[in-house]
Each structure stands twice: as structure tokens, then as C-alpha cells.
Image (cartoon, grey):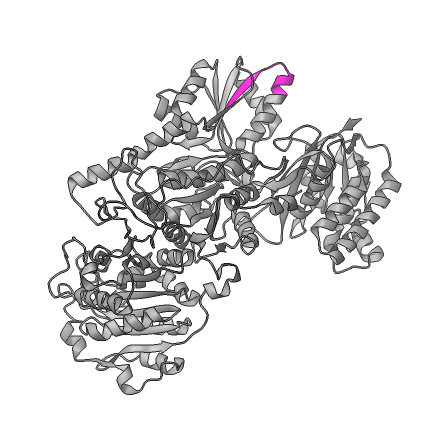
Amino acid sequence: MVGLKDLNTPTRVTWCPGCGNFGILSAFKGALVELGLEREQVVVVSGIGCHGKISDYVNVNTFHGIHGRVLPLATGIKLANPDLVVFGFSGDADCYDEGWDHFCHAVRRNIGMTLIVHNNMILGLTTGQTTATSQTGFRTKSTPFGSVVPPLNPIAHALVSNGSFVARGFAGDPKHLQGLIVQAAKHRGYNYIDVFQPCVTFNYLNTFEWFRQRVYKLEDTGHNVSDRQKALEKSFEWGDHIPIGVFYKDDRPTFRDNLPQVKEVPLTKLPIEDVDISRVIESMK
Amino acid sequence: MHINDFSFLIGGEAGAGIARSGFLLAKACMRGGLHVFGTNDYQSLIRGGHNFYVVRVSDREVHSQTDYVNLLIALNAETVMLHKGDIAPAGGIIYDQEDQTLSLEKLGRTDLKLCPVPMRKIVIEKLKEPHSLIMRNTVALGAAIAVTDYEFALFEAVLRDTFKPEVAESNIRAARIGYDYAKEKFEGDFEYRLKKTSAAGKRRIFLSGNEAIGLGTLRAGCKFYVSYPMTPTTGLLHFMTANERDFHIIAMQPEGEIAAINMIAGGAFAGARAMTATSGGGFCLMSEGLGMVGMTETPVVIMVGQRPGPSTGLPTHSAQGDLRFVIHAAQGEFPRVVIAPGDVEECFYETMRAFNWADKYQLPVIILTDKYLVESEVSAEPFDTNRVKVDRGLIMSDHYEGQGEYHRYEVTETGVSPRALPSTKGAVVHANSDEHTEDGLTSEAPDVTTMMMDKRLRKLHWLRKEMEERGVGTTKFYGPEEALATIVSWGSTKGPIREAMDLLGSEGKAVSFLQVVYLQPFPKTRVEEVLNRARKTIVVESNSTSQLSSLIRDYLLRGVDHKILKYDGRPFNPTALSERIKEAL
């Protein structure tokens, strides 16, 4: 089983000092150790943005893809070899802007994987522009007079699209986040965790302090995680009190559970040397 | 009297089952030992509009449709109006007198044979199936069998094999009534006849390019097929999904083409042979993903079925306008293979090779087709399923036994790095769309950038070398060595060109034909050799700027003597093509 040290790579971390990404990285590494996984079993898929560099910082199998496409890439990996434990890492622009259509369909499809979204409500790597989760009135280089559209509510979207595991974490509480990642990885469906990840360089509004004053844990309030209606209600809470933790969870069958022809063996383990196509040829005579 | 050299044209409204009727008729002819070629022409709509399907039948091998029609089967008045000019001397028309009143005087053709069949009336009054007016087609097909003096039993057997028992029975009744009616009314004096040959029986197969590629895909061991519906490649999606349970594979429709290419990249990275198919518009969306598989050296196969652009263009027609596009799509420079099969045999064998090239050289392979190739159906000898063996290249077993940590992008002489799949014991695999060091971790260092670019592009050299040494048919040559001119072309134009060559040959004008099957890497040595020997060079293409000529100019620094181009969305017809070739001689 993997130890924390085995997970290091030689690459120097280039996130800004104090970046919320450090909390996510340490929570993720802690979760891998806690889950008792082997490095070879795990695949990290990341997109483009500051979050995407995580694939250089964790020594498990990784695929650093292109902007917005974490989910289809991870879906392909998981469908081809369900024995792999697949974690997607995406950012708010990567997932909720460029890759939004994939998000809606991945929730519906219920592929057995975990998606962790580094949500800092701004584009960091391109030096500060608005994203789908930026708040109305938020001033950035691309919205110098303030964003004029309301932010997207990804938790509510996941819930109304039949999400089977919907949670939110906070990079300022890595221990709690680690617990969420462990729970997610043990759940069979499409496990989605949105993570508040303050950008210390470009987001002057949604800072660590801003979140600390507002977040509270759903599990401390006796929230029933199997009540989708209640979860939806909670997903609209914003302002002085913002919930984190598991909003909703159920055990509906995964995409693969519904494909009887591939239940037993991973696609990658099927013999390919001598596939018999004679019956199909015969049907064309 | 003409025996066994024949073209039917079945025309009617969209939604009237035109393509299905053509398929049934063609298959009945094939089972009588005849060679058949069927092609459809339809519009981007579900009901109304004009659809037609042409079936060419002959006792010699056929490669395309013809310029003329011997028997027009008109399921509406419009069909006669649009196609009466295509009818060969002494040809015939089967039509419903309820749709239109025809007379030879009105048509201005005293040579034609008119065969009015009360199709609608038969369905309503004799079959008593007023809600299944689509069976008018079957009545008309039965009549066509009678008029051409063909064997009804062959048609009956095809109906029985194609439909569910109760549907088959009512169709057989409909066909029989049409057959008997025509036998009684039009017996005996039609100029064109069909006769069962000694090759009759269930020997040949009748299939489309899409299906031939599908067979190759299954046989090559592709386990993960992801494709968003887009004409003309939707047929391949249907073929793969219909077979997914029997072959224990996943064939699925994602949310779009961007998802499709990224999903197959994931599946291929995990170790499954993976493929997608689309047309130009979908391929535009895939371009960024294509670059990613190029950079990450992930083996995938992409079938692109061309149709006329720009943009939505003519969505249900055919063109060869995307050659340059597929060769250059995506930012940056990376190796890729582009193969353009020209008939169903090449669709099958080149698809099997495509998966091997992808695995051995760890790069994207594009199978470039068009609507005319993948949706036309043709009779063929059953394929030799052992001609191309599965070759996965350098893939480790489930254990990494190398020195030190595994490096996904190890620099090697050939540029190909041994591949470990995720879950290989002792190996951690880093795939990276950023430029990277040998271990797959991100690097922006100038020396690394140069080294890795060289490593990837080096694969092309070895690929070309292997193709040459193993005698892979990167080009094919047809016709005599001594010829008045050499035609150079690629893809689906092959069929009409071969037919045109026969026509020219029968007039004593010998031309030869160089088919370029591999467009990337471009087989420059072989093409140059042939062009240097040619008395005259004529490029034939279904595009407006002659993209193959521009490749020849790029690679060989020379022009060609003539270009015969067609870009109206329709395939070349052999006679018209032979006339244009004659003008160029």
C-alpha cells in the first residue's frame, strides 16, 4: 500500500504560496493513503488551469488532458478498465465553462469515478478573468466594470440531473475534505465534490477568511443525505451561511451496471487476437 | 436482347422505403450469382423530397453505378419527370397509373416499354392492407422481377431472410401479386433480361463501406467505439451498437464529438483498442482532441466520412474536400496516418491495418472516406479475415521489469516508447498534453522541447520504411504499363475510374490508374516513379481545388497535366468521366 512519501514527484510545485490547491493536494494524498490504494491502481485525470498541475505533483498514473475535457477522458478510462480507481481534477472554468456539457452528461451517466472541482471563482492561470461561478458584480480583467450575470449553481445542477453523490468541500479544511474524498472513492457512482479553493493572487473577494466566516458542515446539522429535495434546498443557501459536506447520495446503478455484455471482464482484458466475425459475414450473404 | 447488364432505379418520396427496396432487389440479384452495386441519393429530411436508389447488375464485376437506367421503378410522378432522360434505349418504366397517366407520345420516346401497375389499388383491395401503403414498393419490385424475367424464388428468399416471419409473409404476397400481374400484362417483349448464373447461391456478401469498416473494426479487436451520429458515418454507429452485446464491447453515443474523441483517448490510454467516426463538422470539433492524442502518443482510429462543405453544405451527399483538412487539423506538428480506402475490400483490410499502425506507432490514424463509399452497397467475395494479423506493438505484459522508474516517453531510435498500460505492476504512467520529459512530467525547457518533437516525428520515417519493406499497398496501379495517360486519384473515385477505363479500353484507348491509398505519410517514391513514366498525368478528384495535385506539388515539386474535378455533391458517372478523360488525352 502506498505511503505519503511514495506519492511525491520530482517536479517543483509552482502554485502561489498559500494557494487553496495545497489543501486539495494534501487532502487527496491523505485520502489515497487512507484508502490503502496502490499507485498503479489509481489514475488522476486533470484539465488545464492551475488545478491541472496536480498531475505533475502526484506520483500515480496521470493523464493531463486539454481544457474542459477531464470528464470524457476519465469516462473512457473507467469504461475501458473498471478496475482502475479514477479521479478527475478540474477547475471552475475548466468544468463549469469550457466543459459544462460534459458535466451535465457525466452526472446523468453515473460513471464510477470521482470528480473534484477546484472552484476559486476566477481564472487564475490566465491572470484573472471571470468564470461561471464568479459572483455578480465581480470585477476582473475581462469584466472591469463587474460581471453582469449571476453565477451558475453547480451543486443544484448536479442534484437535478440525478447526481448520485453530490458534495462540497473547502480547501481551508483539508481534513474534512480528505473525509469527503474517501467517502466518494468508496461510493460506486459518479461522485462529485465541488471544492472552495481560494485564489490568493486574483480573487480579492472570495478569500480564505471570507469562506471561514460562512461555511458550516451539513453533517453537524443532522442533514439527511438521502433526501434530494432537502439537498436541493440546501444547495441554494448562499450569503452568510454556506453549507459544505455531503448534500446527497444514493446507490442507483452505474452506467456499466446497465451493460450486461461487459459486466464481468474489463475491455482491456478481452482477447483481441482472433475475434470471430463469421456470423456477421454470414448474415450479409 | 441484353442479358445480365442492367440498371434499376427506384425513386419516390423520402419515407417510402426506397433504400430498403433497392437493398432487397440488389440482394436477390446477388444471390442469382450476379455482381451488384447499389447507391442511394437522398436529401436531409425524413418525409417528402425525392429519394432514389440505383442498382447496377452485371455478370462481370461492377465498381460503380452507370450513367443510364434500364428500368425505372417510379413510386411517384416526380421520379418519372426527373429521370426519364436517364432511361436507356428500349428501357422501361414501372409506375402506378393512379399517380400519373403516361404515354409514349407525351414522353417523346417511342422506344420505351410502359408497365403501369396499380400498386396502390393492389395493396388496398387485394392485400387488404390500406394502412401499409409502403408495400406498394414490394408490389413494384415483384413486377420488376417479372418484367426482367428473373426468378421470383430468389426474391422471395431474400424477403424471408430480411423480415420477421409475419412481415415477410405479407411482403411475399404483395410481391407475388405484382409479379403475377406483370407476367400476365407485360410478358416477353422487354429488351433487358436477368438470368441466374452458375455462381448462384449464398456465396458473396452484400455490404456498404460502413459495414465493411465495421467488420474490420470488430475483427481488429476494437472494444470501445464512441461516436455521435452524423451522416454519412451513422451507419457505422448503428452497426457497432447492434453488435456490442455479441462481441462484449462498448459502443456508445456520447454528448458530442468533443466527448467522443476524448473518451476514446481515455479508453486507448487504458489499453482498449478504441475508435470514433464522424464527418467534417464533427471532425472540426475533434481537432483539439486529435492534437492531444498526437502529443500524448495515444493510439486511436478516427473514420471521417466526407460530405460537401463548407459548413453544413450538402449534408447527405458526397465530396472529397477534406483531404488537406484531415492532414493538417490541430495546432502544432505531430505524426499521423491518413488512409483512403477506395472500395469495400480496402475498407475492411485498411481498417484492420489502421488499428495496427495506431498501436505500433502510437499515433492517431484517420480512415478518410466519403458518403459515396460508405453508404453505397456492393457485392463482394467474403473477406480473408486472416490477411492482416493483429499487432499491438510494444506493450508490456502486466509487469514492468525495466531499470528504475518507468518512463512513458523514453527516447528511442524509432521514436516509439515501450508502452505500459495503467495497472501494470511496478509502472506508473504519466500521459501529458503539455510538452514533457521522458517520464511524462511537464517541461518547458528548450532542449527537451526539441528532443521530444524529434522523437515523435521520427516515427514517420520508420513507419514509411516499414510500409515500403513490407510492401503494404500504399498505392495501387491498374491498367497497362503502356498507356496514353495515367490517372491519379484517391478514395471513392476508384470505382467510376475503373469503369471509365473499361469504356475507354473498349474504344482502343488504353489508360492506366494510380490509386493513392495512403495520403499520410505520402508515398512519394512510388508516386514519383509512376508519374515519371506516365505519358500524360490526369488527376481526378471530387473537390474544386484539386487537393491531391497540391500534395503532389508539395512532395514531388511537380505539377500534373490535367485535372478533372467534380464538386456538385454527386459521384462521377463512368461514361461522363470517360468523355472528360478523352478530352484530356
Magenta-span inclusion, residue A80: no
| x and y percentages locating residue B505 in the rendered image | 62, 17
Q: Is residue B101 visible?
A: no
Is B76 placed above or below A130 here? Answer: above
Left or right of A51 on screen, residue B175? right
Considering depth in this image, is B537 or B347 the residue closer to the camera? B347
Task: Give the quadrant of residue A193.
Answer: bottom left
Residue B507 located within the stretch drawn in magenta: yes
x, y percentage for residue B167? 74, 56
Can you say which quadrant of the picture contains the N terminus of chain B?
top right
> In this view of the protein, which residue sits in the foreground, B560 or A280?
A280
Q: Nearer the viewer, residue B465 or A151?
A: B465
Q: Name the residue located 17 percent from the left edge and 45 percent from the top edge.
A: B444
Q: Is residue A219 left or right of residue B240?
A: left
Residue that extends furthest to the left in the rendered view of this protein: A17
Which residue: 63% across, 46% down?
B50
Q: Is residue B278 left or right of residue B55?
A: left
Extreme residue in the bottom direction: A222
Q: How many numbered marks appear? A: 0
Instruction: Find residue B235 and report its horizontal and vertical position in percent.
Output: 55, 48
Q: How far across and down, in percent of the image, does residue B388 sit?
A: 50, 36
Which region is colored magenta? B503-514
Is residue A208 visible to us here? yes
Task: Please indicate whether residue B98 sits to the left or right of residue B453 in the image.
Answer: right
